[in-house]
Image (spheres, coloured by chain):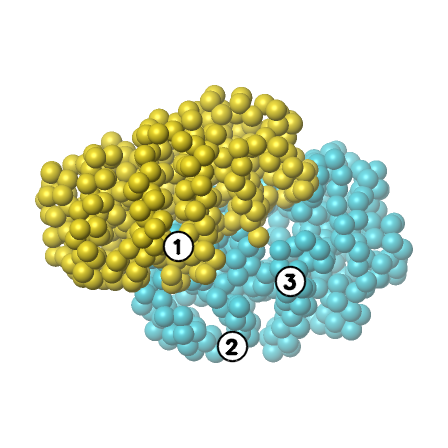
Chain colours: A cyan, B yellow
């Protein structure tokens, strides 16, 4: 069972958890950003001071096979055994690829995730999803493997650009949409520009718990867990398109825009209230701006959606949709025409 | 729970199991040998006839990252989704790498293993070990993932060279050593050159059940499952040395010789009866010949043993040893001097 710790005493937390895991050797995976900006701030941790540091290049384009091979090689060449530990100190790229490397090196070593971005705290901390991008597709290769512990601390987020915070906040909005109206409203009431890290830690814990409840009900994603996919079928398609254009966009922005596309579908199929759709679209437009697409992009977007790994068939496209906030329906099928209409309305809502 | 089927009606078995799994698309992984020699013999199976065939090159040197990337790419490019199925039709290379590809493609699709060699039937059918060689080390990268079903049929073994049968038989001898004297004696009494496939299927089922019992007691290999490692610490070192010399040896031969090294250590540390040691050494020498090593190879062999993934530390070397047939002790530590002495005695027993 994965331990999940919310604390701002991060060095103490790391040292005491590592002491219970008794690894014979500890590795820390960082990217060049977290190596420079975060790792030095945790110098009081004796564990981190004595650890072997493995560095990969930052950015989602480096969540690839080359980086994975680099981590595997470094672990092997620097004497990792099956009783060794890897601490993944970074954003979603570092936690996803580091946990996949840890899950597969000698068929599995011990893993601790220390997410350093709001997005990776929300998204990568629970559920044991690990992986890399491959063959031009997001998370095409990976495994389900929970870490031994995840340590979440808002004090690590203060070096983040606002874009990163917003990116994580999109996942929290998603959790609000699938939980209940109170949680959802408290998120829309919070001022993400306020730097109120204490309140953010509360909202974050609430949000992670929404996710945890759903994942525990359905660890291998056969049913209700697909609720967490809300916004992601369209979002991943936006992300893949942006990658293809050589102008990557933050995952959370893609999810924010994807949420709107899927709420439009929810409105079309399940009468999701249009006033809530308008309200969220306005919030997202004001905070995240818009993603520029034209009709010419529709075939590519549909193709990406068909190949999304959550999709069971390449002849139809699957979504999780909502009747209302907190009231969801998994395994909805949308036709190509419905999706094209939803993309048309998305463009209207975002003034594209 | 993995289904395990012993049958010579293999085509019927495949079709009926696939029908219960309801994949949206079926892939068959073969190597160029099984594609030529085995696949055409199973033409009565409608499942196999309609499946997408993925081919890799035969041989342990191809159980590598390149082959894995090829399988991942073919799955993706030919429309595999998370509800697709991969049937691994081949020896240990095909079942290990195919199951690892299946375990990691989109974080896991359905898997059926159809081992076509005695070794892979014994070794790869139970326990969910999947993986590839990496960085010059055997099975350095992999995952624990059981197949949905394993279909074992001795009728597929008749195209095998005798070397392949002997290779598998070494693992059966190992299972005999760790079970009881009756099973062990029935194995030493069987004439592996007789081509009595019915008797072989009985012995095989017995042997797989020994393994299954142990794996079920300890699925993640924290304790008693290490009994299955008997012969493998020394055996993997022989195998790695042979690979380094560019003269690969069959895995089972390496295990056969490794069993003797580790029974010598068992005799030294736990008074394993020397008459049994002599008896098995004679059987193995007569059937498997010997592996040529000199004192000059000892440092390399020790280095390989230290880096074996079952080893918890790089400063000492771990073995599973025996007091007697069926009476074992896991987590024995041997010093470098003891191992060198055991290798000396191994060379004496094999007239090297």
**In the rendered structure, which disc, 1 or 2, sits on the residue that comes first in sequence?**
2
The x and y percentages for residue A69 are 41, 45
Q: In which quarter of the image is residue A177?
A: bottom right
- Labels in figure, total: 3
Tell me how far mark 1 sits from mark 3, CA to CA.
Answer: 30 Å
Q: Nearer the viewer's eye, disc 1 or disc 3? A: 3
Query: Which x, y percent locates residue B107?
Result: 57, 48
Q: Residue A8 carries which label?
A: 2
- Left or right position of B221 against B135: right
Picture residue at 35% right of the left edge, 57% below the top:
B226
Depth check: B305 or A64 in front? Answer: B305
Q: Is mark 1 on a helix, strand or loop?
A: strand
Give the labeled residue for mark 3.
A215
Identify the chain of the residue marked 1, using the numbered disc in the image. A
- Where residue B267 sits, quadrant-wise, is bottom left
Q: Distance between the residues labelled 1 and 2?
A: 24 Å
Q: Is mark 2 on a helix, strand or loop?
A: loop
Task: Give the residue at mark 1.
Answer: A55
Mark 3, other Cα within 10 Å: few <14 / some 14–19 / many ≥20: many
Which residue occupies the foreground of this view, B179 or A82?
Answer: B179
């Amino acid at each position: 069972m994965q331990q999940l710790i919310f604390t701002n005493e991060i060095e103490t937390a790391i040292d005491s958890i590592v002491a219970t895991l008794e690894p014979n050797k500890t590795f820390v995976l960082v990217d060049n950003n977290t190596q420079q900006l975060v790792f030095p701030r945790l110098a009081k941790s004796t564990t981190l001071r004595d650890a072997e540091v493995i560095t990969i290049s930052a950015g989602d384009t480096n969540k690839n096979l080359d980086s994975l091979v680099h981590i595997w090689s470094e672990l092997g060449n620097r004497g990792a055994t099956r009783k060794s530990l890897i601490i993944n100190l970074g954003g979603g790229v570092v936690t996803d690829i580091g946990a996949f490397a840890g899950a597969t090196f000698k068929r599995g070593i011990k893993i601790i995730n220390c997410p350093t971005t709001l997005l990776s705290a929300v998204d990568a901390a629970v559920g044991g999803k690990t992986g890399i991008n491959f063959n031009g597709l997001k998370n095409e290769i990976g495994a389900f493997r929970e870490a031994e512990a995840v340590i979440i601390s808002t004090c690590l987020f203060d070096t983040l650009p606002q874009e990163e915070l917003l990116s994580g906040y999109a996942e929290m909005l998603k959790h609000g949409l699938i939980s209940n109206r109170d949680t959802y409203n408290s998120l829309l009431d919070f001022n993400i520009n306020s730097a109120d890290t204490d309140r953010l830690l509360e909202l974050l814990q609430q949000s992670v718990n929404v996710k945890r409840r759903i994942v525990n009900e359905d660890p291998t994603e056969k049913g209700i867990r697909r609720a967490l996919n809300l916004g992601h079928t369209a979002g991943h398609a936006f992300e893949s398109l942006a990658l293809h254009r050589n102008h990557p966009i933050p995952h959370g922005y893609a999810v924010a825009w994807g949420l709107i596309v899927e709420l439009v579908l929810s409105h079309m199929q399940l009468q999701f209230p249009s006033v809530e759709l308008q309200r969220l679209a306005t919030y997202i437009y004001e905070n995240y701006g818009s993603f520029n697409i034209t009709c010419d992009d529709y075939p590519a977007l549909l193709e990406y959606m068909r190949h999304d790994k959550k999709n069971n068939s390449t002849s139809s496209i699957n979504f999780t949709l909502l009747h209302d906030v907190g009231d969801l329906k998994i395994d909805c099928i949308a036709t190509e025409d419905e999706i094209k209409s939803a993309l048309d309305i998305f463009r209207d809502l975002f003034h594209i």
